Image (tube, rainbow, N blue to C red):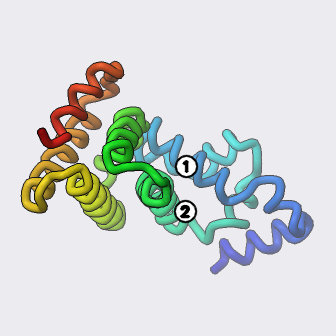
Amino acid sequence: MVAFVFAVVNTLGYGGVMDEKLNRYRWLAAGLQALAEHGPDGLRIMPIAGQLQVTKGSFYWHFQNLDDYRRAVLQEWERHYTGEPIRYLEDEALDYREKLRLWIVGATYSDLRLERAIRAWASHDAAARDVCKRVDAERIGFLVKLLGGVGWPDEQAQVLGQWAYCAWVGLATLGDLSYTERQLGVILSFLMPK
């Protein structure tokens, strides 16, 4: 409560300009970047404020405290790296083969440092673990749906979806491996029923 009152007093002079000058999204994007580069210990107010070239009053304009910020960063990761891509592909008028290709290519080229940082964080933090489990379940569910859409029977789509996702998580933990279009073609041909 004290931090909130301080933030209000400290930002009254800015009025609505504070939000325009540095919005909540920029704080969340900077948090995701700090998380990818330094792990959960990188989610610290002053270093991120310094990177954004603002005072910590800007932080308190958008977040109650560091715990609130950490929860918001986790929610932003879930929204940006799972919810939005799924909604985008569900809304697109593409066949399931193309949706599966886009999903696999997008996952392959995502920021694997961020995935590693989230999973490391989840190993010792209950809130991060809960979000990670929810994201994993949503991603697997969507992958299973895509595999069913390309022709795999339900049980096989379930097994193949879980296996493919586990392989991707393993890839994320190994490091930033890259695949050529040809190599991605091999992966996709394996995921398409014969």
Helix, strand or loop at mark 1: helix
User: What percent of the width, then of the height, locates residue 55?
Assistant: 75, 52
Residue type at mark 2: give it.
Answer: Tyr
Q: Is residue 189 above or below residue 31?
A: above
Q: Quadrant of the N terminus?
A: bottom right
Q: Nearer the viewer, residue 145 or 9?
A: 145
The foreground one among 37 and 174 is 174
Mark 2 vs 1: CB contact within 8 A: yes
SS at mark 2 in the image: helix
| Left or right of 40 on screen, residue 23 | right
Q: Which numbered disc flags the more N-terminal residue, 2 or 1?
A: 1
Along the line of sight, which residue is nearer the eye, 176 or 162? 162
State the quadrant of the C terminus.
Answer: top left
Residue 183 seen: yes
Instruction: Tell me which residue sits at (52%, 64%) in the image.
Output: 72
Tag 1 residue: 31
Q: In the displayed orientation, state which residue is furthest to the right.
A: 13
**What's the residue at 58%, 67% (across, down)?**
65
**Residue at the spot of label 2:** 69
Distance (Cα) linking label 2 and label 1: 8 Å
Q: Position of residue 48 (x, y in %)?
A: 62, 46
Query: Identity of the amino acid at label 1?
Result: Gly
Query: How dense is the environment of label 2, judged by Cα within 10 Å: few (below 14), some, or many (20 and up)?
Result: many
